Image (cartoon, helix red, strand yellow):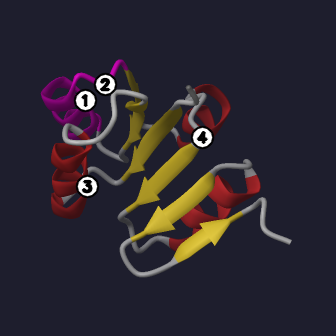
Amino acid sequence: MNSDKWCIIGPGNIAHHFAEDMKLVKPTQKLEAVFSDHKKSANEFADRFHIAKRFTSLDDFIDKSSGDIAISETSEYYKIELAISSGLILFSSLLCYSSTSN
């Protein structure tokens, strides 16, 4: 059985709804990491949803998160570009990006 490791970029309101909904899906889907510019926000989100990996450096998030898929709920486009260039499949509330698309 394949599993997917999901990462959150920007733990705001929409990300909270997404994380709540993740509780309803197959156990093979796991919240792996969270990135926020603010340590307090990253820690609060990670504690609430039992996520071990939390990052405030986007470079560390990309290098160490070991995620397969990221949900981005930030309007800061450079974060989206960096996540795409790292090989993550990236979703946003408005758009869907994939670095693996041809």
Which callout, 1 or 3, points at the residue further toward the start of the chain?
3
Q: Residue furthest top?
A: 52
- Which-is-in-front pick, marks 2 and 4? 4
The residues tagged by marks 4 and 3 sit, at their Cα atoms, a distance apart of 17 Å
* Outermost right residue: 102
- Residue 75: x %, y % from top left: 41, 74
- Span shown in magenta: 39-52
Name the N-terminal-most of marks 2 and 1.
1
Tell me the CA gap for discs 3 and 2.
13 Å
* Pointer 2 with pointer 4, Cβ within 8 A: no
> Which one is nearer the viewer's eye here, 31 or 4?
4
The amino acid type of the residue labelled 2 equals: Ile
Give the distance between the C-alpha atoms of the residues marked 2 and 4, in whole angstroms.
15 Å
Q: Give the class, few, some or many, for how many residues have Cα within 10 Å of label 3's Cα (few <14, many ≥20).
A: many
The reply to whether callout 2 and callout 1 are in contact (CB within 8 Å) is yes
Residue type (three-letter) at the residue carrying disc 1 = Ala
**Residue 15 tag number:** 3
Q: Secondary structure at mark 4?
A: loop
Q: Nearer the viewer, mark 1 or mark 4?
A: 4
